[in-house]
Every structure is written in structure tokens, then in C-alpha cells.
Image: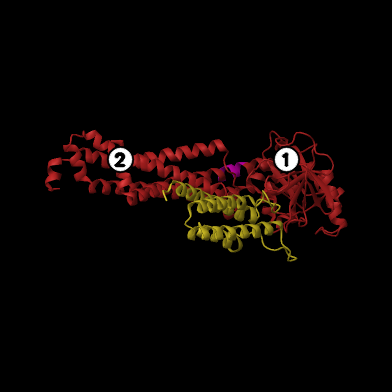
Chain colours: A yellow, B red
């Protein structure tokens, strides 16, 4: 989960970033979505890191729940919460949004599995 | 017997995971490849339907533009004009059953983004190419400053879009076609003339002082009965100066050829992956059964019928292939559906995903084909194990 969240936070700025700057140097709407996803990704990474060191079962379950909720929020940021560019053929729609959604879905599945494993564990 | 197959799978997790992964990749290749080929075919059909006319007549100078094909086929932003005198000369020629004028204009960058949008104007009274398509999404006639937007534009019914300082209302959003038409804006000739005039007034029209009342971008023509499109094209090109008549099928022949090439390569790859996958599964199951010949011999001595031994091997293969195929189909959906835009851009060809029903059909067919292939590959080993000579194997003489 730690690796996935780091991939999301770094990747959204470096690999599957949104559209570039306009000719006048200003940024389009999708740039805000990109930044927001990065901040949520950092938050998810911190939660995952905390989950590695915290051995208390209840706290671990709460952290996983928070992580799953953060992943859902990050998946909804591009277009649903923050509107993006004019055409679906633009990079923010065709590259950034699908990668963010798939990455967040994988992260959320891992978080849910972590919750189930924590609840089922005896200690 | 079923529990023995399950125990065999659980007992050798590494081997089972490898077999599931092979089966998954086999299904993914077949399902993904089929979806891509089907999407390309649908895209070409959509492009043919959208052109919708036998012939397109454009000003001759337009055909010398570098991106002429992109403008008329992919709706890349761009425009050209010819005066009404040339239009009249074309319309006077013989063999024309239907003719309608169209007007092109590329917007300046929209306020939100650094992209231009292609605006296409048509005459609702004579149009026979765009109206039937728009009618599917919007049954009323377009009022002044009403526009219809393509499916890939991030604008919705009721929104206002501004072009050259003129606010236009979005009356409808069109169905997806998988072509460049998805990023275009359609409107009536009155509205586009106003937009052209506004672009001229703002000094943003590349043709300078063009008169919107006296210009047209192209004429769409259907040949009359008794005339072939080729005859009409030759007649116009021979008798009307400074225009170029082009047959629609000629326009899309380049796209069609590219599409045929890409589809062919994908078909070959699917076959290669399928053959390779089946051979690997065949070898894997054979090796797995050979390793366990003594186990099967003991089961045979303990009273298991020959058919039961074959059943254990087939049951194991069936379970592995079903799990692998389901994962392969899920992987296919996870790659093709969200990333269809990237695939379309990478191929540079019209790309229209099939409907939900056809997607489900392809998924089911891929799942069945791969499960059947894997199970048949295991059937060879099952047949061999059902014929084992227990005495020879238990004595260790094999």
C-alpha cells in the first residue's frame, strides 16, 4: 500500500501528469486536480507508513478505513469533483484520470483486504 | 475427486499460480485483441456514416493544405472557403441528386484550455449528412446561437460556450462515434455565419476580410440515379475551375488501409499468443502429471477407476483455467475501458468501443475459448494417466 500511494503521489506529477501549461504560462483546470491528487497521495502514504509501525489492531483497522476513504476521494477528484479540460482526448482525460482511478481502485482493494485480515486475526 | 483436485492446486501454489497467470495472459490477449479489432471496425463504420455523402467538393487551394485530410476526416481545427459563384457552377452540373453546403471555422483557444475546437455549420433545409445523426440526440430544430457538441467535449446540455465573444447555448450532446467528429461543434449556417463575421471583426480569421454571406467551405453531394459518383466527380473536376471534387471512399481509403494493416497484425498476434499459450499449458500439465505418476498409481491401486484419474487431472485444469480466464477478462476490461483514449491516440485511427452487450459477448466467448483450450491441453495428460500401468510405475521401472 505504501508503494502504491507513493506511486500515486509521485506519478501524478511525473509520469501520468495532467495537461501542460498554456502558451501564456498559465495552467488549465486539470492542474488543480493533479495537485489535489498528489496531496491526497501523500496523505495515503503517511497513513500506510503509520500502519506499518502501529501494531494495535483497532488503530490499524481505523487507519486502513481512512486510507480506503482517501483512495475513493482521490479517484473522484479528476472530473467528478474538479472539472477538467475541454476535450476527452486531452491528456488529463485520456491518461491522468484512468491511471488515478485504476491506482486508487487497487489501493482501496488492498486497504479493504487489510481491514478483513486485521479483523480475522486472533491477536 | 473434486477435493483431490482442489488439494492438488493448493498443495503446489507456485505451480498453480504460474498456470493461472498463463491462462490469464492467454485470455487477456484474445479478449483485448478482439475488443481492439472490433473498436477499429466500428470506428471505420462510424466514419463512413458520418461522411454520409458520395462526394465532397472543396476549394482547390484547400487540398494543398498540409492538414487537409485531418480537417475533413479527423475534424482537426482548420478552415477554408470558396465563394458562392463556384458553388453555383458546381450545382449546375448534371448527376447531382442531393447537395448541401457546409461551413468550417476553428475556434480560438477556449477560456479553460489551450485547444481550438472545430465548428461545423450546416444548412438544415438541405442537409442530409449531419441532421440524421443529430436527430438521434436532439429532435427539435436548432435555434439561433444553439450548438450541438460532440461526445468528447466537456460541455453539457444547457451550458454556454463562447466563440469569438459570441455566447452559444449547448442544445444537445451527440452519441460517441470514435472519430474526430466527437470533438467538433455543430450549428446552423446562420449561427456559423455570425461566428465567422465575429472572427473577422476581431481580426482573428486567417483569411482576413472574408464575407460570410458569400462563402462556403465545402459541398456534400449525392449522385443521382443513373450516374456513378466517379462520373459526377470527373464532370465537376473537368468543368468547374478552382474546385476539387473527391469521392468519400477515396478520402477514407487511407484510413481503411491503415486499419486493415493494424487489424491484421493484431489477428496474427492473437493467433501466435493463443498457440504459444496452449503449447505452454500442454507442457505444464504434462510435466505436472509426470511428476505425480506414482501418486496416481497409488490411487489406482486403492481402487480409483481410470476415468476418476482422468477426472482429477481435468478438474484441476478446469479450475485453473476458469480462474485464469476470469482474471484475464477483468484485466482486459481494466486496460481497454479506461485507456481507450490512449489506445485511440496511439493508433491514430477511428476507435469506437463496442456496446455493453457486445463487450459481454466477447468476454464470455474469450472465457469459454480459453477454458476449453486449457482443458483440452490437459486432456492429453488425462488420457495418458488413465492408461498407466500401475505395476511398472510402482516398481520404478518407468
Looking at the image, which is closer to me, A77 or A27? A77
- The span from disc 2 to disc 1 (Cα, nearest Å) is 60 Å
Main secondary structure along the magenta-highlighted residues? helix
Q: Where residue B318 appears, x then y in whole percent?
A: 35, 39
Q: Is residue B151 magenta?
A: no
Disc marking residue B349: none
SS class, disc 2: helix
Image spot of residue B274 (x, y percent): 40, 46
| Of residues B374 and B217, the one drawn nearer to the viewer in this rendering | B374
User: In the image, is residue B44 part of the stretch drawn in magenta?
Assistant: yes
Q: Helix, strand, or loop for circle 1?
A: loop
B369 left or right of B193 in image = left
- The 10 Å Cα crowd at callout 1, few under 14, some 14 to 19, many 20 or more, is many
Q: Is residue A73 visible?
A: yes
Q: Residue at x 57, y 63 (%)?
A: A10
Q: Quadrant of residue B373?
A: top left
Q: Mark 2 packing: few (<14 Cα in 10 Å), some, or many (20+)?
A: some
Seen in the image, is B230 located left or right of residue A55?
right
Q: Position of residue B172 (x, y in %)?
A: 74, 40
Q: Is residue B76 above or below residue A14?
A: above
User: Which of the two discs, 2 and 1, sits closer to the camera?
Assistant: 2
Residue at numbered disc 2: B5
* In the rendered image, residues at marks 2 and 1 fall on the same chain: yes
The answer to which of marks 2 and 1 sits earlier in the sequence is 2
Residue depicted at 21% across the width and 33% down the height: B305
Residue range in magenta is B40-45
> Which one is in front, B117 or B315?
B315
Q: Position of residue B259 (x, y in %)?
A: 55, 49
Q: Which residue is mark 1?
A: B130
At x 68%, y 50%, the residue is A81
Amino acid at each position: 500500500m505504501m508503494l502504491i500511494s507513493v506511486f500515486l503521489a509521485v506519478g501524478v506529477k511525473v509520469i501520468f501528469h495532467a495537461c501542460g501549461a498554456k502558451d501564456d504560462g498559465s495552467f488549465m483546470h486539470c492542474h488543480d486536480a493533479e495537485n489535489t491528487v498528489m496531496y491526497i497521495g501523500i496523505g495515503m502514504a503517511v497513513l500506510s507508513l503509520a500502519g506499518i509501525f502501529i501494531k494495535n489492531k483497532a488503530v490499524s483497522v481505523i487507519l486502513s478505513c481512512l486510507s480506503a476513504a482517501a483512495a475513493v476521494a482521490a479517484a473522484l477528484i479528476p472530473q467528478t469533483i474538479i472539472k477538467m479540460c475541454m476535450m476527452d482526448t486531452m491528456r488529463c482525460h485520456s491518461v491522468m484520470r484512468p491511471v488515478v482511478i485504476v491506482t486508487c481502485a487497487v489501493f482501496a482493494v488492498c486497504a479493504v483486504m487489510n481491514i478483513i485480515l486485521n479483523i480475522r486475526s486472533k491477536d | 475427486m473434486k477435493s483431490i483436485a482442489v488439494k492438488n492446486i493448493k498443495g503446489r501454489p507456485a505451480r498453480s499460480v504460474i498456470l493461472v497467470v498463463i491462462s490469464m495472459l492467454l485470455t487477456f490477449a484474445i479478449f483485448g485483441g478482439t475488443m481492439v479489432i472490433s473498436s477499429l471496425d466500428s470506428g471505420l463504420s462510424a466514419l463512413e456514416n458520418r461522411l454520409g455523402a458520395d462526394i465532397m467538393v472543396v476549394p482547390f487551394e484547400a487540398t494543398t493544405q498540409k492538414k487537409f485530410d485531418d480537417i475533413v476526416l479527423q475534424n482537426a481545427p482548420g478552415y477554408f472557403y470558396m465563394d458562392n459563384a463556384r458553388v453555383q457552377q458546381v450545382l449546375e452540373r448534371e448527376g447531382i441528386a442531393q447537395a448541401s453546403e457546409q461551413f468550417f471555422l476553428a475556434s480560438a483557444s477556449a477560456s479553460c484550455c489551450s485547444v481550438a475546437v472545430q465548428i461545423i455549420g450546416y444548412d438544415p433545409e438541405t442537409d442530409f449528412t449531419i441532421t440524421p445523426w443529430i436527430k438521434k440526440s436532439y429532435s427539435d430544430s436548432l435555434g439561433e446561437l444553439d450548438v450541438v457538441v460532440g461526445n468528447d467535449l466537456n460541455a453539457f446540455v444547457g451550458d454556454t460556450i463562447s466563440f469569438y465573444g459570441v455566447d452559444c447555448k449547448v442544445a444537445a450532446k451527440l452519441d460517441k462515434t470514435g472519430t474526430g467528429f466527437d470533438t467538433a461543434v455543430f450549428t446552423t449556417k446562420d449561427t456559423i455565419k455570425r461566428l465567422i463575421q465575429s472572427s473577422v471583426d476581431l481580426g482573428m480569421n486567417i483569411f482576413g476580410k472574408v464575407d460570410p454571406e458569400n462563402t462556403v467551405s465545402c459541398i456534400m453531394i449525392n449522385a443521382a440515379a443513373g450516374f456513378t459518383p466517379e462520373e459526377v466527380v470527373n464532370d465537376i473536376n473537368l468543368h468547374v475551375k478552382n474546385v476539387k471534387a473527391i469521392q468519400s471512399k477515396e478520402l477514407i481509403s487511407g484510413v481503411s488501409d491503415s486499419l486493415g494493416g493494424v487489424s491484421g497484425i493484431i489477428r496474427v498476434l492473437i493467433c501466435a499468443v493463443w498457440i504459444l499459450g496452449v503449447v505452454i499449458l500442454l507442457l505444464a500439465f504434462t510435466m505436472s502429471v509426470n511428476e505425480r505418476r506414482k501418486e496416481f498409481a497409488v490411487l489406482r491401486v486403492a481402487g480409483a477407476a481410470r476415468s476418476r484419474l482422468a477426472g482429477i487431472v481435468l478438474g484441476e485444469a478446469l479450475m485453473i483455467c476458469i480462474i485464469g480466464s476470469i482474471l484475464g477478462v477483468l484485466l482486459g476490461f481494466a486496460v481497454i475501458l479506461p485507456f481507450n483514449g490512449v489506445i485511440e491516440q496511439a493508433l491514430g485511427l477511428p476507435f469506437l468501443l463496442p456496446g455493453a452487450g457486445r463487450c459481454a459477448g466477447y468476454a464470455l466467448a474469450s472465457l469459454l475459448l480459453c477454458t476449453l483450450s486449457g482443458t483440452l491441453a490437459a486432456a492429453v495428460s488425462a488420457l495418458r494417466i488413465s492408461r498407466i500401468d500401475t505395476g511398472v510405475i510402482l516398481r520404478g521401472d518407468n
